[in-house]
Amino acid sequence: MTVKATYLGHATVLLEGSKKILIDPFLTSNPKAAAKPKELTGIDVVAVTHDHEDHFEDAFSICKREKAVFVGIHELAVAAQREGLTAEPMNIGGSVTVGGVRISMVHATHSSYKGHVAGLIFEIDGKTIYHMGDTGLTYDMKILPEFFDIDLAFVPIGDRYTMGPPSAAKAVEWCGAKKAVPIHYNTFPLIEVDPEDFRKRLPDGVVCVVEPGGSVKV
Ligand code: NI
Ligand code: MN
């Protein structure tokens, strides 16, 4: 079955297959967001990589409205449960299965207010999709192909807070992703980057530069 992955701007991604999964929703305060929170309906799972505002802003409110399951690191899941939400607590190295979708939490290196930042790998309808979260290049990515056959990766390239194009390209090479979509750039002046600089560092056809609102099917 085909999975449609839509880039909604910054680090927000919507996966649509047998389930609808919203990752790192930052829509209300993002002037470049391709959707408003109220436009996202039928969401089964809201998953977050960490609690910085530009990944977490709309997570609890959308979960509450959609009666979606919140998936995040233990500390954030407990906070969600205190808000009356249904949550699947987990931590780095582990996985949970929600509605037939396996979600694995992998290492990322960055900061957070609560818990730890993480990368998330979704196995849905026979496809494997990796959202790297906010991260620097970390050698742990190199071990991922032993456990996952990654069809598509969402890769932060904006520099300053995350990898820039050279290390982001190395991250794609190491994790073995067949396709990569750059994220977390050009939302604000502080993270202005030319995505071509990322695209040209990898073999032709690997990088799909997608404007907010655009989709990739795997
Ligand atoms: Ni962050
Ligand atoms: Mn961020």
Image (tube, rainbow, N blue to C red):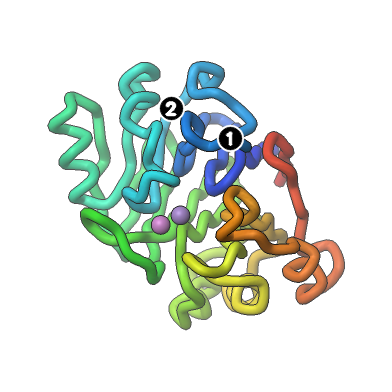
Residue 113: % across, % down: 24, 55
Residue sticking out furthest to the right: 204
Residue 69: % across, % down: 33, 31
- Residue for badge 2: 44
Q: Which mark is residue 31?
A: 1
- Secondary structure found at label 1: loop
Residue sticking out furthest to the bottom: 139
**Residue at 60% in and 48% down:** 187
Judge depth for marks 2 and 1 and give the one in front. Answer: 1
Residue 109: % across, % down: 39, 71
Q: Quadrant of the N terminus?
A: top right
- Left or right of residue 76, residue 218 in this image: right
Q: Nearer the viewer, residue 14 or 10?
A: 10
Circle 1 residues within 10 Å: few <14, some 14–19, many ≥20: few
- Image quadrant where residue 7 sits: top right
Residue type at mark 1 is Pro
Q: Is residue 86 visible in this depiction of the protein?
A: yes
Report the Cα–Cα distance between label 2 and label 1: 25 Å
Mark before the other along the chain sequence, 2 or 1: 1
- Image quadrant where residue 64 sits: top left
Residue type at mark 2 is Asp
- Image quadrant where residue 61 sits: top left
Location of residue 20 with respect to 136 vertically, above or below? above
- Secondary structure found at label 2: loop
Residue 89: % across, % down: 23, 46
Q: Which mark is residue 65?
A: none
Q: Nearer the viewer, residue 25 or 161?
A: 161
**Residue at 47% in and 82% down:** 139
